[in-house]
Image (cartoon, rainbow, N blue to C red):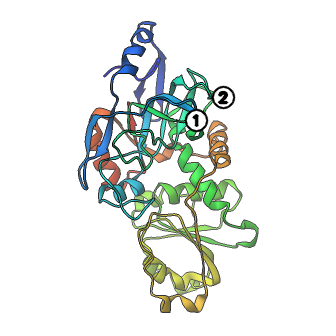
Amino acid sequence: MTPCTGLTFVACCNCIIFATLNVEWYRTLAVEMNRKPKGIIYPKANRINFVELTPLPLGPSDVRVRTLATSITPGVERFVLTGKSITSKEIKFPVLSGSELVGEVVEIGSNVIDVEVGDYVFVHRVDNWLELTPLFGCQAEYVVTNQANVIPIRRQPEEKDILIGLVAYAISAVKKLNLEAIERILIVGLGSVGLMLAEYLNYKGFSAVDACEKYQTRGLLAAAKDIAFDILDFPSDYLERYDVIIETTGRLLILEQAMKLLKPRGTFLLVGNYDEMKLDYRLIQDKEPIFVTSIRTSDDDFFEAKYLLSEDALPVEKFLTHRFPVSEYEQAYDVALNRADAIKTVLVW
């Protein structure tokens, strides 16, 4: 495999180690940029492939980025793999996978002002692809995207920078809550989102967080106090204990079971991926719960996330549980989507 930037990297247990290459790499850059990049697509439901892609031409506000690392976001990819979209009612194949990448800028448009060639960046959306449906579209060795989708890292990149999007998602969700008026929170599901929410709440000084998670290996990673394997495992003294219940699993019916744990007029914060709102209203109406959705992440959230990671304010290394070279993408997706101990799976390009 050819090196991914002017720096090469090797996956290790805790980080991506970068080492300077000789100038020969720069002589091949023009050739690399002119060939079609490869990426990971779903040609149809329940199929995955690694193929050549055709990006749209670089526009005046676009940047071209050569990928260092991407990650697999199970909540998003399970939906897409089964033929569902998290952004619209229907999905049109083929779909390019991936919702985040860290890379190096190799070309910029004439109107780009925030980044320069050679900068390291985090990218959270790439929609400049020909004949592809790019929900986020980041699993490719080269990408072209608008500068609005690029967060400059401003330093040597580290593997943890792939988590900028996840941290930003947690920040955005917590902004929906008035923590000063809340006594206790329950997080349902300790996948990457649930675990990061617990960490960010703890960083904000809110430690009265419990969780429900069926896999013990994930519970051991959580910054939570009391953890149950199942909603039905909570004893009677937990009834009407929580001001907020955060649902991260994408299984809305679990809220009917969790209703007994919510205080009257408490809040359900929905941060999972859902297709239809199916709840038996008769089972929830007496509590008069408030439903709050959280899906959008602002630029301020991304920049705060970058700062927190730069300052080592959150213990995020434990989230990076598996690493694979992109040539082993099939095994990587199998691990990411099916193993209980997989939190964030990194693909090294």
The amino acid at mark 2 is Ile
Quadrant location, the N terminus: top left
**Residue 246: x %, y % from top left:** 55, 69
The amino acid at mark 1 is Gln
User: Which badge, 2 or 1, comes first in the chain's sequence?
Assistant: 2
Check disc 1: other Cα within 10 Å, few if <14, some if 14-19, many if 20+. Answer: many
**Residue 57: x %, y % from top left:** 44, 30
**Would you say 151 lies left or right of 325 here?**
right
- Cβ–Cβ under 8 Å for marks 2 and 1: yes
Quadrant location, the C terminus: top left
Quadrant of res 196 = bottom right
60 is higher (above) or lower (below) than 44: above
- What residue is pinned by disc 1? 147
Q: Is residue 301 visible?
A: yes
**Residue 36: x %, y % from top left:** 33, 27
**Would you say 264 lies left or right of 234 here?**
right
Q: CA distance from mark 2 to mark 1?
A: 8 Å
- What residue is pinned by disc 2? 113
Q: Residue at x 45, y 87 (%)?
A: 280
Q: Is residue 339 visible?
A: no
